[in-house]
Amino acid sequence: MSDDVAEYYNQNTTSFLRFGRGSRTTGSIHRALWGPGVTSHAQAMDYVHTRIITAFQNTMPARETGGDPQRSVQLADLGCGVGASMQRVSAALDAEVSGVTVSSVQQRLATARCASSRRRCRVLTGDFTDPTVLGALADRGPLDGIWMIEAYNHAHDGDELLQGIATILRPGGILAICDDIPDDRLVNGPLNRRETRRREEFVNGWHVHTFWSPEMLRRRAEAHGLELIGHEDYSNYVAVDRPRDLLVRAIAGPARRLHLRGGEWDNMRGGNALQQLSKSRLIRYAMYLFRRR
């Protein structure tokens, strides 16, 4: 993962937690999803966790007869933020969870959070495409499951990431990727001038390095022994045009014309472009489930 991603999260994590309405109370810095039955911000922030937990429960096969009955479920969160997702999934599945973040700020906050909750969690700092980092996650044996929430797009090399994941997942193990997945036209064109500008602002502002359509993701994963077994589209559950979104939209235009970059400016411009691309259905917010063959 490139150094720009680490710098982006080192600069922005504190403000994400301070100003994000759901993040302040939950510690999660991903998007709120207003899915079926959700009535509060806390539930909206937790929605993706419930879907990941359900996916792991429903798709993980029973352990083979003769296995070690004392061995706990081993999971990993790639791009773990400040540890809120690790705590939630660990508690629900009674699992040991290892997390990886490229941000030293997030690693410090996540380690403190896990220590205070006494959950069986540990947090590593590093690039989750690095074979050495991935190998450290599997030092207790192959993993039963891996999830990524709004982290997959940051991978500097998607093929290297999927190959590494396949190496540390046990046969039958599950990979869940939840992220902003572009439509084939947004990846390959043709695009008009406005769409091209918004794509560039999203990719540059949110430091996106892997920009694959759903079919590209499926084919690349399949090449590394990861079979697509499920897909859930959450695009309609993401709130748009909130007062804060309209404020950011008003600021993003002048910021672009003045060539303001770094920290908050990158986040605002990228987020505004993402919302516009999502409203036109050129990007979908979705979860893809894969099983290791």
Image (spheres, rainbow, N blue to C red):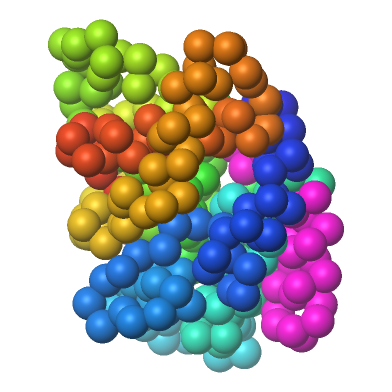
Magenta highlight range: 105-131
Identify the image quadrant of the N terminus: top right
Membership of 238 in magenta stretch: no
Identify the image quadrant of the C terminus: bottom left
- How far across and down, in percent of the image, does residue 178 sit? 38, 53
Compared with 184, 118 (above or below) is: below
- How far across and down, in percent of the image, does residue 265 sit? 60, 29
- Does residue 122 appear to the left or right of 278 in the view shown? right
- Does residue 113 appear to the left or right of 281 in the view shown? right
Q: Residue at x 24, y 53 (%)?
A: 235
Membership of 128 in magenta stretch: yes
Compared with 279, 91 (above or below) is: below
Most foreground residue, 12 or 81: 12
- Does residue 195 appear to the left or right of 86 in the view shown? left
Q: Tell how many labels.
A: 0
Residue 194 visible in this rendered orientation of the protein: yes
- How far across and down, in percent of the image, does residue 152 sit? 47, 42
- Does residue 190 appear to the left or right of 72 in the view shown? left
Residue 158 visible in this rendered orientation of the protein: no
- How far across and down, in percent of the image, does residue 53 sit? 40, 76
Q: Could you say which quadrant of the image residue 113 lies in?
A: bottom right
Q: Residue at x 63, y 53 (%)?
A: 16
Q: Residue at x 71, y 73 (%)?
A: 121
Most foreground residue, 95 or 288: 288
Most foreground residue, 94 or 80: 80
